[in-house]
Every structure is written in structure tokens, then in C-alpha cells.
Image (tube, rainbow, N blue to C red):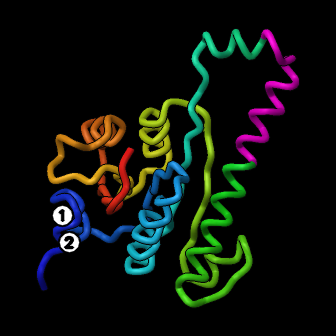
Amino acid sequence: MKPDTSLSPAAQDTMRCSAIKKILYATDLSAEAPKGFHYALSLARQFGAEVTSLHVLDKHSPEADLILAKYFSREQRKELSANNLQQALEEMLHRDSVACSQSGTPASEGECQQTLGVTSINRVVYGKVEEEILACSAHLNPDLIILGAHETFRNRSSLSTVAKRVISRSKVPVTIVPIPGSSC
């Protein structure tokens, strides 16, 4: 059997040497992001793994917080944050439903994981993207991290800063899923 060259060498070693039981998939919820999610689901089905999808909402800078405080009360700012989290979770549930229907098995939002035979958990947090991906990885102890790469790339030097930082600091293998035809 020919090895899958779309996986990093570390990810290939992980697949050969141990079963993948937990996958952390980081998503930006862009229009192209489902391509990476489909890849994560495919691996999860193949290995009987659980997928945790993580979306990180950028935390405001201290300067932005001061400006927001000038125009919105503390309660209004909390409500805006809660609405942003809820919208991201709803988008993730919708994406799950679309992925399920594209697999040929219709299901309502929230039922896709049972239909596909994959446990899929959605998490949304505020913070710095690479820091939250690494913190979630430390907490969940996944066997693999999957990131989508929006750049059309030929070599590692053109990866995004977030991807480079996660790869360099991760204690587990990281697989980059290229998103053909997209660019940042």
C-alpha cells in the first residue's frame, strides 16, 4: 500500500504505529473550511475516532476594548460576546448538517454524528488562535491536529503564521489540508 503523501511524516508515523482515537480540527468557518472538515470526518470514520472542531474568535486588543467600553455598557459587551459565540456554534452545527447531507445521508442539525457514525464535538472560544489550538490540544490530548491551509502552497515556507506556530509548538502530529484555489 502506497503511503498517503498528503499527511506529514509525523502524521504518517502516528497512523502506522497507533490508532487515532481523538482528532482536533481547527476551523475558521470560512466558505472553504468544510473541505478540511470533510477530511477530518473521513479520518475519524476510518479510525473510529472522535472529532473536536475548534473555532477561535479573536480576542479584542486592549485598545479595541477601550473603544467598545466607550460606546457599549459592560452588559452590552457581554451580550455581543455571547451572540458571537452562539452564531459560531450555529454555523458549526449547520456545517455538520451539510457534511452529513453531502455524504448522502440526510440528517437534521445536531444528528449528523449519529448518522455518520462519528462523534463530533464543537467548541468555540475567544483568544489568540494558535494559543487556543495548543491549549485545547493540551487539554484534549488528541492523536492528531488538522488545520486547513487557505494558501495555495508548494512548500512549507508559504504556510500561514498560525499553521507554522502550531506545527513548531505542537506535541502531537499536525496535518495541513490544502484548500485548492483559495487564498488569504
30 lies above or below 180:
above
Residue 65: where, in percent of width, then height? Answer: 68, 15
Which part of the image, by quadrant, shows the N terminus? bottom left
Which part of the image, by quadrant, shows the C terminus? top left
Residue type, numbered disc 1: Asp
Pointer 2 local density, CA inside 10 Å: few below 14, some 14–19, many at least 20: few
Give the residues drawn in magenta, as a range: 70-86
- In magenta segment, residue 85: yes
- In magenta segment, residue 115: no
The residue shown at (49%, 37%) is 132
- The quarter of the picture where residue 84 lies is top right
Residue type, numbered disc 2: Arg
| Disc 1 + disc 2, Cβ < 8 Å | yes
Q: Which residue is mark 1?
A: 13
Q: Which residue is mark 2?
A: 16
**115 left or right of 4?**
right
Residue 120: where, in percent of width, then height? Answer: 57, 67
Q: Secondary structure at mark 1?
A: helix
- The quarter of the picture where residue 175 lies is bottom left
Q: Say which of 13 and 72 sits in front.
A: 72
